[in-house]
Each structure stands twice: as structure tokens, then as C-alpha cells.
Image (tube, grey):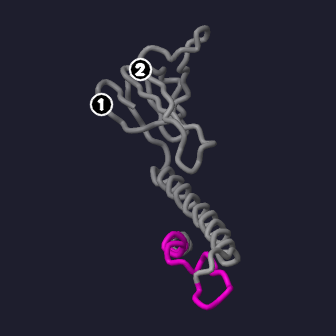
Amino acid sequence: MIVDGQSYGVHAFFAKIRDDFTHRPLNGLEIGDVGPKYGYAVKDNGYMIFSNFRIPRTALLSRYVSLNKDGQLSIQGDPKVAYSTMLFVRISLINFTWKLAISMCLLGIRYTLNRVQFKTISNSAEERRVFDYQATQYQIIPFLAYAYACVFSSKQ
């Protein structure tokens, strides 16, 4: 938020961004699509660039911040509340990550331990487990280590 040329950082607003009839972005806005995320194609990400875009003072979501008619910004409450919320979200993401990573590692390890392929053991009719190949271990074990790192870093 910039008031009278002074930046006050990032604040939440509820503002109209498109024309009611044409549905095009209003003047001063650039909106676009980032494209699919690698590994998470169902998530649709975009961007919005504000360039000299004016938002009414009444559109400020002002639970912790208020802006009077003279352009004076005042903060109510403790700013640590916003920081603790951000920290909680980040910890929740780490908790979600390790659970997903462990389940995917478990799936891959179980599959490669049960799947056999190629008779590469000399003097034997037995096929080798896919997990026994060094290339397979090279791909799976780092992900397992990452999953464990997430487990230990997310414990409180």
C-alpha cells in the first residue's frame, strides 16, 4: 500500500478488478496466467500487477490496520499476530509435505521391492528385484531422506 508516495508494505484489500460489462481488467491492472505447476497441474496460478491503480480507503480489510482520510496509517493490536499466522501456515505446509513424501516413497519402495525384472544374477533363473539396481536406489533414497528431513524439521 502506497499513500502519498510512502510505502506501507503489503496489506489486504477487497477491490473490484474487472469491468462489469466487458469483464476485462480495469485500467492500471495486468492479469495473466502462469501456466500449469510442475507436479500439481490442477492448481491454476496467475499473476496480477498493479500500476497506479487506485483502491478506495473503504476497501481496506482493516481488522489490524486502519487508514484515516488524512492518509495516516494506524496499527491495532500486535504485529506479531500476523507473523505467527504466516509461521503457522509455513509449518502446516511442511507437515503436509512430509506426509505426502513418505506416502509416495512408501509406494515406490514397495513396488520396486516386489517387481522383478531381468535375469541378471549369474547361474540363476531368478530375476532381480528392481530395487536392487543402483539406478533405482539412486532415484528413491534421496526422496526418502528428504521425507525424513521434513519429518524432523516439522516436529514441535
Give residue 53's position: percent from left, percent from top: 41, 20
Give residue 74's position: percent from left, percent from top: 42, 37
Task: Please say whether residue 26 is visible from this viewpoint.
Answer: yes
Q: Spot the residue most to the left.
A: 5
Instruction: Count all numbered tags in the image, as a single digit.
Output: 2
Q: Spot the residue most to the bottom.
A: 123
**Badge 1 density bin: few <14, some 14–19, many ≥20, Cα 10 Å:** few
Instruction: Examine the image and state in which quarter residue 116 appears.
Output: bottom right
* Residue highlighted by disc 1: 6
Q: Which span is picked out in magenta?
A: 121-144
The residues tagged by marks 1 and 2 sit, at their Cα atoms, a distance apart of 15 Å
55 vs 82: above or below: above
* Residue highlighted by disc 2: 53
Amino acid of disc 1: Gln
* Residue 67: assigned label: none
In depth, the one of 102 and 55 nearer the eye is: 102
Q: Quadrant of the C terminus?
A: bottom right
Task: Please say whether residue 156 is visible from this viewpoint.
Answer: no
Q: Is residue 129 magenta?
A: yes
Mark 1 falls on what kind of element?
strand
Nearest to N terminus: mark 1 or mark 2: 1
119 vs 68: above or below: below
In depth, the one of 105 and 154 nearer the eye is: 105
Amino acid of disc 2: Phe
Instruction: Examine the image and state in which quarter residue 147 appears.
Output: bottom right
The residue depicted at 53 percent of the width and 25 percent of the height is: 59
8 vs 58: above or below: below
Q: Is residue 59 magenta?
A: no
In depth, the one of 24 and 36 nearer the eye is: 36
